[in-house]
Image: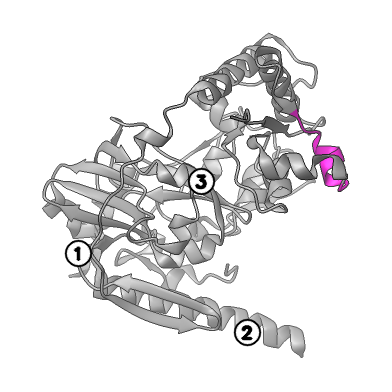
Amino acid sequence: MSNSYDADKETFMGAPRTKIPWWPTIDYSKCDFCMECDKFCPHNVYEKIDDDVRKLFVKNRYNCVVFCRACAKTCALDALTFPDKKEISQLIKKLRSEKS
Amino acid sequence: MTKEIICILPCNGLDKSLGVIAREVSLKVIEKMPDVQLICPVLLNNGDKKYENLIQTSKIVIINGCMTRCPTNLIEKWKQKPFKQIMIPDMSKKYKVKPSKDLILNEENIKLAELIADEIVNDLNKNDQEKDIKIREFQEQDYFDITVDKYYFTVPKEGYFFNENDCWIKPEGNTALLGITDYLQNAAADILFVDLPELGSEIEQFDDVGSFESSKTVLQLISPSPGRIIAINKSLEKNPELMNQDPYLKGWFAEIELKNFEEDKELLMNGPEYFEYMKNKILKEKNHLDQIKSERDV
């Protein structure tokens, strides 16, 4: 999988990827930094920083595959959330109509 | 008739509570079904001959503590398919029991282990797996195809619609079959296990319908349309390789009752459109890999 993803040029379903707010949000009150999500994600979305108190960050938000929530399955503590799919598909439809 | 041997292979990750729970599940299953044989993952990994015959001839239940999936990877070395595979994080969500981080089993973790063990025992006692399998007849399809390096990719020319998550839908009246594309099965490599959805469950457009797992990764089937699950392809539980061998026909995953496919179609691609999309994606990935290779060779 490509790590050198050029988000500005990418589209998803015809809408600019950078206009689609789809990526995981980490709930730090739940996360125990087991790093299973980071180990699992092949798209380099997360970043592990051992020296930081929070240790885990969303580094490359636009690398995240829109509608994929597979990393959340790895989290037994339910510390990862994603936006509402319906709202995102409505937004994509709107962005596509604006473009056309 | 010879009695079928059942064995259980748990994660033994003693440095994580999920591993401790996996181990506890296997002990509880054995308590409930004393004939089940326990496989020690450490000894198995050492290549001990003790398990060679057992693994090749028995029904295997795998209990993974985390996504490292050590038991799955161990079984893959023998090219065996598990009868059932459990992922502790999935189960904790299913049973709404949050495992604590303690390495010493506490009340919550024991409760979760008990629930999972009961599910495994119920499944092992079910003998109706075969009769749930309905044979479907399929008409031959015409395909677009492309070969890149040693990989061959196909896309049906008509009758199917696709999302950008590489999943397809084949509408037939007010119902539709769902599955994964040839691109996705190639990316996953040998599929070893499927997690099918519950019959009757309602899914939204772009919800994950279920997951499938290879030795490389775990992937989700993201539904191109919303609807109610009215059938699942039970034969995939026994023959998950159908998703690799015949992703557009015998490898179908689930069937849904459609709501308004004309509206759903707005965000989907037809065969020729998806073929172009897939081709671009494959060639982009190839260029990227070639670039990495040439930089490495310099």
Q: Position of residue B121 (x, y in %)?
A: 57, 20
Q: Residue furthest bottom?
A: B298
Q: Image quadrant of residue B216?
A: bottom right
| Mark 1 residue type | Gly
**Dot 3 lies on which element?**
helix
Q: Within 10 Å of the Cα at label 1, are there few (<14), some (14-19), or many (20+) other Cα atoms?
A: few
Q: Position of residue B194 (x, y in %)?
A: 49, 44
Q: Nearer the viewer, residue B240 or A71?
A: B240
Looking at the rendered structure, which numbered label has been put on residue B159? 1
User: What residue is disc 3 on?
Assistant: A70
Q: Within 10 Å of the Cα at label 3, are there few (<14), some (14-19), or many (20+) other Cα atoms?
A: some
User: What residue is disc 2 on?
Assistant: B291
**Residue sitting at x 44%, y 67%:** B183
Q: Nearer the viewer, residue A38 or B231?
A: B231
Q: Is residue B98 visible?
A: yes
Numbered disc 3: what chain? A
Numbered disc 1: what chain? B
* B41 is within the stretch colored magenta: yes
Q: Nearer the viewer, mark 1 or mark 3?
A: 1
* Span shown in magenta: B38-47
Q: Position of residue B148 (x, y in %)?
A: 50, 82
Q: How many marks?
A: 3
Q: Image quadrant of residue B209?
A: top left
**Dot 1 lies on which element?**
loop
* B75 is within the stretch colored magenta: no
Q: Within 10 Å of the Cα at label 2, are there few (<14), some (14-19), or many (20+) other Cα atoms?
A: few
Q: Position of residue B96 (x, y in %)?
A: 51, 19
Q: Which quadrant does the N terminus of chain B fall into?
A: top right
